[in-house]
Image (spheres, helix red, strand yellow):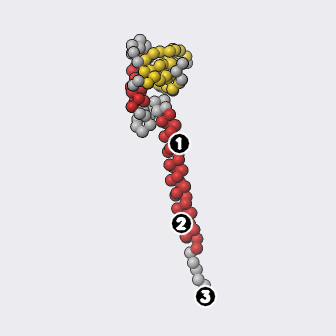
Amino acid sequence: MLVLTERGSDREGKRRRIAAVLAVLGGLVGSWAVGSVLASDPIGYGVPIWPFADTVDRAENALLGRVVTAVRANTPLNDANVQVLRKTDAYGSEFWTLKLKVDGETRCREVAVGLNVTSRRVDCF
C-alpha cells in the first residue's frame, strides 16, 4: 500500500508568507529612506508638498517663484525678503546665490535658471 502526502505545500506556503513579510518590510524601509531624503530639501527635489515640506518650505517655494520670474524677465529684484549674494552667468544659465527671509527664518539657496530651474540649499555665509 502506497500513501502519498503533500509535504511540500506547507513549506511553500510558509516561504510565501516569509517572502511577503520581507517584501512589505523592504517597502516600508525604502519609503522611509526616500521620504527622509525628500524632506531634507523638498524644494530642491521639486516636492514642496505635505508631508515632505512644512509651511516655511512652502513659503520659500512661493518666494522663489517670484525670484525666478524676475530672473527670466531680467528685471531688478525688488523684494525686502531676498538678498542677492552673488550672480554668475555661465553655460547659458543664470546662477544666483540668495539669502531668503521666510517666516522669521533665514535660508540660503543657490538657484540656476536656464531652460529648467534648479536649486539647492547652501550654507549662509
Which mark is drawn over residue 1?
Answer: 3
Measured Cα–Cα span from mark 3 to mark 2: 29 Å
Mark 3 vs 2: CB contact within 8 A: no
Left or right of 60? Residue 15 is right
Q: Which amino acid does label 1 sit on?
A: Ala
The residue identified by callout 2 is 13
Q: Which residue is drawn at 54% across and 18% down?
A: 125
The outermost residue toward the right is: 1
Check disc 3 and report its element: helix, strand or loop: loop
Q: Which residue is drawn at 60% across and 84% down?
A: 2
Mark 1 vs 3: CB contact within 8 A: no
The outermost residue toward the bottom is: 1
Q: Which residue is drawn at 51% across and 26% down?
A: 121
Residue 35 % position (x, y): 49, 40
Name the N-terminal-most of marks 1 and 3.
3
Which mark is drawn over residue 33?
Answer: 1
Q: What residue type is labelled 2?
A: Gly
Task: Check the image and report above or below for 101 versus 76.
Answer: below
Disc 1: CA contacts within 10 A as few (<14), some (14-19) or many (>=20): few
Disc 2: CA contacts within 10 A as few (<14), some (14-19) or many (>=20): few
- The residue nearer to you, when weighing 113 against 96, is 96
